[in-house]
Image (cartoon, helix red, strand yellow):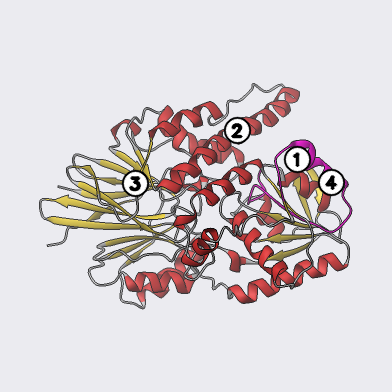
Amino acid sequence: MTTTIKFCGGARTVTGSMHLVSLDRSQVLLDCGLFHGRRDEAYTVNSNFIFNPQRLRACILSHAHIDHCGNVPNLIKKGYRSHIFATPPTKKLCDYMIPDSGYVQEEDIKFINKINKRRGLPPRLPLYTKKDAENSLKYIRSLQYNTKFALSKDIDLTFFEAGHILGSAIPVLDVKTSRGIIRIAYAVDLGRYGMPLLRNPEVPKDIDYLIIESTYGGRKHSSIKDAEDELADAINRTVKRGGKIIIPSFALERTQLIVYFISELIKRKKIKKIPIYVDSPLAVNLTKVFQENWEYFDEITKASFEREEDPLGYDNITYVTKVNDSKKLNDERRPMIIISASGMCENGRILHHLKNNIENPHNMIIVIGFMAKDTLGRRIVERKKEVRIFGMPRALNAEVVTLNAFSSHADKNGLVQYAKQCRGKLKEVFIVHGEESQSEVLRTNLKRLNLKVRIPAKNETVYLSSRK
């Protein structure tokens, strides 16, 4: 019996995670994420699978970020009809994340078709619609952490805590072959130890093969304490000059985390109590999921909820849902913090806030997450003199501050330490989900542990050997 892994997406790049584990009788897909990049390239990549979805026995979602779950509707459109497995919080988060992605696809294509109509070009279709997305949700089935489940006669699945976002998991596959067991751990994305709200990542035992991310494979995060000080300094500096603080943020996890940190700074009187606006209908719904699933958080956060103290609901926070209320923020001249999606500044209400505030030198843009290549967010991080928003050039005059320490991804030290804890029966490590420069640094560091390490290319297939 032959066992292989084909790295179908998220190999030597950050987004579009998708990896196919194949046996003679079964095929299992690890994640089904959207690739983010230039519009035409992303459409082509996301529209086509290099395997037959109808042959899959199961699809497994590590967590609810769109670059890991966002191509599920296309999987269903192409004929997949089996279960999609996720933890209970991930299932509930996907109820909002995936339909929102369908809505974004439709709105994006409306914008493109307006341009195409003026140019005399034929209209285009969205990658998938909100209706397609909603239809795909019925295939998702929840599975609790640390509970072994038989996907087939020859593959068992167990979810372990990943510590990356609410509901994130390290899926472990126990593949039964005629020569023994092959145990595969999928640590993509992997969280950090000691992060507020979240539980620490778990280390499964007796791993044969480890698939690990490398988003920050060559970078070290500063401490949370230092990041809090930098955040406080940036906010105080902007408030002093009467500006606004614009924070592009993923609606899922990063928004809730930054709200928590800013609220703590106010509570400790390290910054003034200024208005905080979370301008994202999606973030509002996701925050409710966080509040309803508090038992999946760390002990400190659970204790807060048990005391009926919601760390995400302070009285200076306004959750904005209506478009008119969002537009009114443009007319406000007082200092405030606006947290808005999308995290990489590719779509959503953040584009309107950037358009209206990016040219004012009194304002500040605080970047708190990874920005992929060829996104507006990356161009802001790189401090380009001019960026295009809604097709129009805008001078980047606002101050830009990047705070990677708030990332919920493990840094290079965390990744190495995690791999070190997986040693023992570990035969090989596969590095994915990272730009090549980051993956190369991680490979060098893992080789110092005398581990066999590979950075697979997209669509590369590797053969696995069983435990004797």
Name the residue located 26 percent from the left edge and 63 percent from the top edge: 207
- Please identify the quarter of the rendering in which residue 255 is found: bottom right
Rounded to the nearest whole Å, what is the CA distance between mark 4 and mark 1? 17 Å
Q: In the orientation shown, which residue stands out farthest toward the front?
A: 307
Magenta run includes residue 333: yes
In this rendering, the label closer to the viewer, 4 or 3: 3
Rounded to the nearest whole Å, what is the CA distance between mark 4 and mark 2? 24 Å
**Mark earlier in primary sequence (3, 2):** 2
CB-based contact (under 8 Å), mark 4 and mark 2? no
**Mark earlier in primary sequence (4, 1):** 4
Q: Which residue is mark 3?
A: 143
SS category of the residue bearing label 4: helix
Q: Is residue 12 visible?
A: no
Residue 45 located left or right of residue 422 = right
Mark 3: which amino acid? Answer: Leu
Instruction: State the image coordinates of residue 41 (x, y, percent, origin top left).
Output: 55, 40
SS category of the residue bearing label 2: helix
Vertical arrangement, residue 422 with respect to residue 138, above or below: below
Vertical arrangement, residue 204 with respect to residue 8, above or below: below
**Mark earlier in primary sequence (3, 1):** 3
Q: Which residue is mark 2?
A: 103
Which residue occupies the foreground of this view, 131 or 27? Answer: 131
Residue 359 located left or right of residue 91 = right
Mark 2: which amino acid? Answer: Tyr
